[in-house]
Image (cartoon, rainbow, N blue to C red):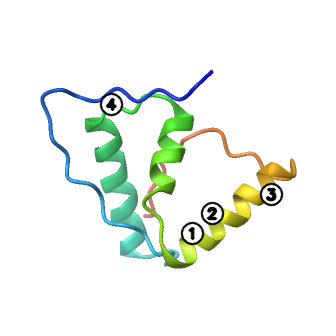
Amino acid sequence: GGSVIRWSANVKATEPCKYGGKRGSKELDNFLWCMERYLEVMVVVDDASKINTASLYLKDDAVLRWRRCCDDKAQGICIINTWISSRVS
């Protein structure tokens, strides 16, 4: 099936800040929290759409890591097809 994004007619959401790749940081925790809120308000309902939408908000080292994951996926090495909400503690 295709990706499904249902836009909420009554809410205008501020786009989340881009995430640059710092691991284990407040930046990552804040990015994930903001992305969850954004996806919720924009009524992004399926995992593929959540993953694709979140990937648009990556920059710097995070983009490089995501590109490697996409290359691995194309080769059948890695599969990322579920969105699990797990923020850094």
- Percent of width and height locating residue 18: 38, 67
Residue 72 marker: 3
Question: Farthest residue toward the top?
Answer: 1
Mark closest to the chain's N terminus, 4 or 1: 4
Residue that appears at 32% across and 30% down: 43
Upstream in sequence: badge 4 or badge 2: 4
Give whichever of 47, 12 is nearer the camera. 12
3D distance between C-alphas at marks 4 and 2 = 24 Å
At label 1, which amino acid type do we have? Answer: Val
Q: In this view, does 73 lie above or below 57?
A: above
- Determine whether, in the image, residue 48 is placed left or right of residue 72: left
Q: Is mark 4 on a helix, strand or loop?
A: loop
Residue 43 is tagged as 4
Task: Identify which amino acid the numbered label 3 is placed on.
Answer: Asp
Q: Distance between the residues labelled 2 and 1?
A: 5 Å
Q: Mark 2 points at which residue?
A: 66
Q: Upstream in the sequence, badge 3 or badge 1? A: 1
- Residue 36 pos. (x, y %): 36, 46
Please, what is the three-letter code of the amino acid marked with disc 2? Trp
Badge 2 crowding class, 10 Å Cα cut-off, few under 14, some 14 to 19, many 20 or more, is some
- Residue 57, located in which quarter of the rendered image? bottom left
Q: CA gap, disc 4 to disc 1?
A: 24 Å
According to the picture, the residue beneath numbered tag 1 turns out to be: 63
Indicate whether 19 appears above or below 11. below
* Spatial separation of the CA atoms under disc 2 and disc 3: 10 Å
Left or right, residue 58 beside residue 79: left
Q: What residue type is labelled 4?
A: Val
* Residue found 33% across the figure and 64% down from its top: 30
